[in-house]
Amino acid sequence: MKWIRISGGTVPAGEWHPAQEAAGLWWAATPLTVAGVPVTGLTLPHAAQLAHRLGARVPTSAEWEWMASGGVRRFPWGDDAPSRGHANLRGLGPGHPTPVRTRAAGRTPDGLWDVGGNVWEWTTAPWRRDRVALLRGGSYNSLAQYAECAHANDVPPGITSPGIGLRPVRDTAPTPPTHGDTP
């Protein structure tokens, strides 16, 4: 798994979170995959367990929004409306998760793939009293507005779907790959 360092910054208040500082973090370059296709059907507790096995965690919703928008972008790739080259969304893809790293126009300026579209990504909302989970990024079955950086869906943490995956985040630098590991 490749990790990319994203510098921190101030996340403005939004519908889903108060204004707050996002620390510099190490983000998975793609959602968690098997054979290049996002792993789906995960509950939030299961996603948290998988992230922990990787020495990572599930990001907060505000951290995810900062990673996706850099505080200035409407969509993870910029302000242009989504096209087939940007994201796997309803009407722009085949109607199911597809291999990551196939839509170069949809990469973030920092080099993260499939942040908008393909599969929703689990995030947490620790500042909310109800402790619901928030999904970010939209999926292959989402309308274009769901891929906007500021959009989130609140869901129960036990829900599963073929359109929900995970992009783990690390607070510290990953250890270098050893022989046989994929970078």
Image (cartoon, rainbow, N blue to C red):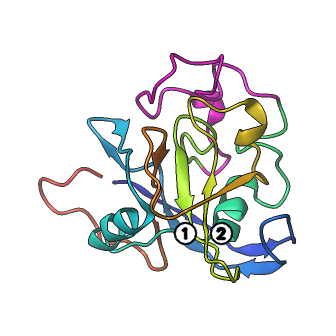
How far apart in space, not on screen, are marks 1 and 2 (Cα)?
Answer: 6 Å
Q: Which mark is residue 63?
A: 2
Q: Is residue 163 magenta?
A: no
Question: At numbered mark 2, what does the secondary structure look like: helix, strand or loop?
Answer: helix
Amino acid under disc 1: Pro
| In-image side of 48 versus 94 (left or right) | left
Residue extent of the magenta highlight: 81-110
Labels 1 and 2 touching (C-beta < 8 A): yes
Q: Badge 1, how many Cα within 10 Å: few under 14, some, many 20+? A: many
x, y (%) of residue 118? 53, 34
Query: From the viewer's perspective, is residue 155 above or below residue 38?
Result: below
Q: Which mark is residue 1?
A: none
Which is more toward the observer, 16 or 73? Answer: 16
Residue at image position (58%, 37%) is 139
| In-image side of 122 versus 55 (left or right) | right
| In-image side of 123 versus 148 (left or right) | left
Q: Which residue is mark 1?
A: 59
Amino acid under disc 2: Glu
Can residue 44 be seen in the rendering of this structure?
yes
Query: From the viewer's perspective, is residue 60 above or below residue 84?
Result: below
x, y (%) of residue 173? 42, 75
Q: Quadrant of the N terminus?
A: bottom left
Which of the 4 image quarters holds residue 140?
A: top right
